[in-house]
Amino acid sequence: MVTYLGTPKIETERLILRRMELSDTQKVFDNWLSDERISENRVNSEHKTVSETTERVTKIVDGYVNKDFCWWAIERKVDGELIGEIDLYDFDNTTGNCEVSYSIGYEWWNQGYATEALRAVVEFGFRQMNIHKIAAAHNTDNPASGKVLVKAGMVQEGIIKHMIRNAKSQYKDCTIYGILQEDYSKTLISPSSTSSTDSEKHVCKT
Ligand SMILES: CC(C)(COP(=O)(O)OP(=O)(O)OC[C@H]1O[C@@H](n2cnc3c(N)ncnc32)[C@H](O)[C@@H]1OP(=O)(O)O)[C@@H](O)C(=O)NCCC(=O)NCCS
């Protein structure tokens, strides 16, 4: 049974995962939601106006009244910059399973931030919320996301053809990953660790 705890603050070595605030809107727009390099790998298109971002951030902020709403803004400790977001969603009370998704602003790619945030959220999900399984899917043409998932201990389960249709109406094949709580307990992945694992050979894309 999942223990819903809302969106508490989580600290890692270099990051603070915290609730999104309305005052973050401009940064969310500037740093990732207006950027086509990010939206290419998401279902929705990039935002053209800040008002689209305001609408989305407002929905997130309103969501915090619900205990089963887990949506973190990712802030760098070194300069307080808001660099991305990560959320647990689609909780299934029958299985205790859910999914995870994340985005990091282009300026901060390839510095291990997504991996660090994901490891912290996976640890929180299993140890604090008692989630049974965390799953993720990424487009097969987005190998960086596959690397992130593997570095967080997730295992490739298969590929689903034309699983999504993006904002440009392109069908995308997706690689599915998952990790069970019982397997996580055996791997002992440290949230602050940024080193690679053997399983990185399972490369995929979101
Ligand atoms: C996917 C994403 C979150 C990765 O964030 P990040 O902070 O750069 O990730 P990390 O630095 O933790 O890890 C990225 C890894 O991918 C690797 N990588 C980057 N580009 C790659 C490519 N084209 N092919 C293969 N590997 C690649 C990096 O080398 C790194 O691996 P390493 O640590 O072994 O060197 C970021 O690119 C992003 O936000 N993309 C757009 C949105 C998105 O795809 N979200 C995920 C949806 S499932």
Image (tube, helix red, strand yellow):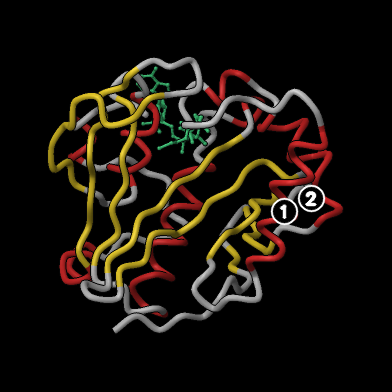
- For the point 28% across and 42% down, the residue is 150
Q: Is 14 placed above or below 128 here?
A: above
Q: Which residue is mark 1?
A: 77
Locate ligand 1 by image quadrant: top left
What is the x, y in percent for residue 130? 32, 79
Which of 25 and 45 lies nearest the eye of the viewer? Answer: 45
Q: Quadrant of residue 60?
A: bottom right
Q: Looking at the image, how many numbered discs can be counted on the residues?
A: 2
Q: Residues within 10 Å of mark 2 (few under 14, many from 20)?
A: few
Which of 180 and 152 lies nearest the eye of the viewer? Answer: 180
Helix, strand or loop status at disc 2: loop
Instruction: Tell me: 1 left or right of 11.
Output: left
- For the point 30% across and 75% down, the residue is 93
Instruction: Tell me: 124 left or right of 66.
Output: left
Instruction: Tell me: 53 left or right of 168.
Output: right
Q: Which residue is mark 2?
A: 80
Residue type beneath disc 1:
Lys
Q: Residues within 10 Å of mark 1 (few under 14, many from 20)?
A: some
Tell me the quadrant of the picture where the N terminus can be found: bottom left
Instruction: Tell me: 22 left or right of 159.
Output: right
